[in-house]
């Protein structure tokens, strides 16, 4: 995913960068970029396609684990309320 860093605190941008499924289009917040920058970013993603797919697979496993554990988390919340 090519991202445009408009806010450094954006959690999606940070997570994407951390697990290597996203690269910022610029190095600075709200930085300028050219058509060549976009084409370069797309070429880099194409080159790293296999690594990105592995990273997405790991992220999916994490998300599936969160979803699987959701009923237990909700039950803990209910228990705290009661």
Image: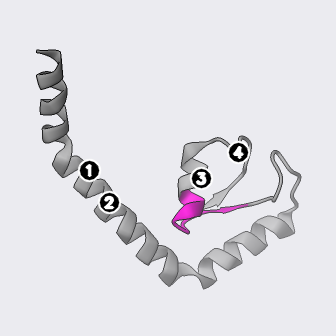
Residue range corresponding to the magenta coloring: 16-24
Inspect the magenta stretch and tell me whether residue 5 lies in it. Answer: no
Q: Is residue 17 above or below residue 45?
A: above
The picture places residue 52, in percent across and down from the top left corner, at 50, 74
Between the residue at mark 4 and the residue at mark 1, the CA separation in whole angstroms equals 25 Å
Q: Which residue is mark 3?
A: 14
Mark 4 or mark 1: which comes first in sequence?
4
Q: Which mark is residue 36?
A: none
Asked whether residue 21 is drawn in magenta, I would say yes
Q: CA distance from mark 3 to mark 4?
A: 8 Å
Residue 34 at x, y percent in the picture:
88, 61
Contact? badges 3 and 1 (CB < 8 Å): no
Secondary structure type for disc 3: helix
Q: Is residue 32 above or below residue 46?
A: above
> Is there CB contact under 8 Å for labels 2 and 4?
no
| Res 42 quadrant in image | bottom right
- Name the residue beneath numbered marker 2: 62
Mark 3 and mark 2 lie on one chain; the one further toward the N terminus is 3
Q: Residue at x 74, y 43 (%)?
A: 6
* Left or right of residue 75: residue 55: right
The residue singled out by tag 4 in the image is 8
Q: Is residue 17 left or right of residue 65?
A: right
Q: Secondary structure at mark 1?
A: helix
Answer with mark 2 or mark 4, whichever residue precedes in sequence: 4
> Horizontally, is 75 left or right of 46 in the view?
left
According to the image, label 1 marks what residue? 66
């Amino acid at each position: 995913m090519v991202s445009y860093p408009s806010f450094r605190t954006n959690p999606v941008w940070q997570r994407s960068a951390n697990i290597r499924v996203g690269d910022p289009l610029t190095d600075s917040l709200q930085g300028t970029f050219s058509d060549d920058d976009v084409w370069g970013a797309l070429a880099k993603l194409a080159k790293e396609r296999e690594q990105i797919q592995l990273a997405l697979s790991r992220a999916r496993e994490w998300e599936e684990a969160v979803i699987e554990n959701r009923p237990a988390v909700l039950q803990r919340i209910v228990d705290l309320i009661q």
